[in-house]
């Protein structure tokens, strides 16, 4: 007698598993080994076993699952070892090429930095020289202008003092 699983039996399953069940089977499905193989990747079989199997059937499922898990781990570990065996020399080659390329880069960068320093130092020397000349010119012009300013101000001050003295005298005399 074929056994069925009904959507209503999946009430505690996650939303996505219930939705997937409904999309694939509708409200119920007749269970078969062929069907299980076809949908093996789609469903959470541990959840189904825990919630839909009797205790003796669950024990049998767990025994088969544990053996399959051990086989998977053995295959996975062998594949990992093969992967590392292929990867390790390739990684060593990559690191060798990378280290050589880094050394070349560092050489070129250091040469460029040295050239940069030279060019910068020459440009800085030119800058200081030009600024020095310009400052000398500025100081000369400023000094001459200051002397003219002082001369004009001194004369104006003398005139101011005379005006004040005369104003005082007149005011004093008429007081």
Image (tube, rainbow, N blue to C red):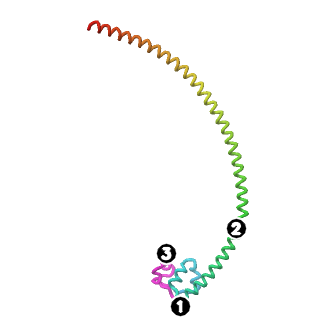
Q: Over which residues does the magenta segment extend?
A: 1-28
- 80 or 155, which lies in front? 155
Q: Is residue 40 magenta?
A: no
* Mark toward the start of the polypeptide (1 vs 3): 1
Which residue, as the protein is rendered here, is positioned at the far left? 175
For the point 50% across and 83% down, the residue is: 51
Residue 16 disc label = 3
| Residue 154 to residue 46: above or below | above
Residue 2 disc label = 1
| Mark 2, residue position | 84
Q: Measure the alpha-carbon separation of dots 3 and 2.
A: 37 Å
Counting from the top left corner in percent of width and height, residue 7 is at 47, 82
Q: Quadrant of residue 170?
A: top left
Kind of element beneath mark 3: helix
* Mark toward the start of the polypeptide (3 vs 2): 3
Counting from the top left corner in percent of width and height, residue 100 is at 72, 53
- Please report contact status of discs 1 and 3: CB closer than 8 Å, yes or no: no
| Residue 25 to residue 173: above or below | below
Foreground mark, 3 or 2, reads 2
Foreground mark, 1 or 3, reads 3
Label 3 crowd (10 A; few <14 / some 14-19 / many >=20): few
Q: Measure the alpha-carbon separation of dots 2 and 1.
A: 48 Å
Q: Is residue 24 magenta?
A: yes
Residue 77 disc label = none
Label 2 crowd (10 A; few <14 / some 14-19 / many >=20): few
| Residue 92 to residue 4: above or below | above
Counting from the top left corner in percent of width and height, residue 38 is at 58, 81
Kind of element beneath mark 2: helix
For the point 67% across and 36% down, the residue is: 118
- 105 or 146, which lies in front? 146
| Residue 49 to residue 150: above or below | below
């Amino acid at each position: 007698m074929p056994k069925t699983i009904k959507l209503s039996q999946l009430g505690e399953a996650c939303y996505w598993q219930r939705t997937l069940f409904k999309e694939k089977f509708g409200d119920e499905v007749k269970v078969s080994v062929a069907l299980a193989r076809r949908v093996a990747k789609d469903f959470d079989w541990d959840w189904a076993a825990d919630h839909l199997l009797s205790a003796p059937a669950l024990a049998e499922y767990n025994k088969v699952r544990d053996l399959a898990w051990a086989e998977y781990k053995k295959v996975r570990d062998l594949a990992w070892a093969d992967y590392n065996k292929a990867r390790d020399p390739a990684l060593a080659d990559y690191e060798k090429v990378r280290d050589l390329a880094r050394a070349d880069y560092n050489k070129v960068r250091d040469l460029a930095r040295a050239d940069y320093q030279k060019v910068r130092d020459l440009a800085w020397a030119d800058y200081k020289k030009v600024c020095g000349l310009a400052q000398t010119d500025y100081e000369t012009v400023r000094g001459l202008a200051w002397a003219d300013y002082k001369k004009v101000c001194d004369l104006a001050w003398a005139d101011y003092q005379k005006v004040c003295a005369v104003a005082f005298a007149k005011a004093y005399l008429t007081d």
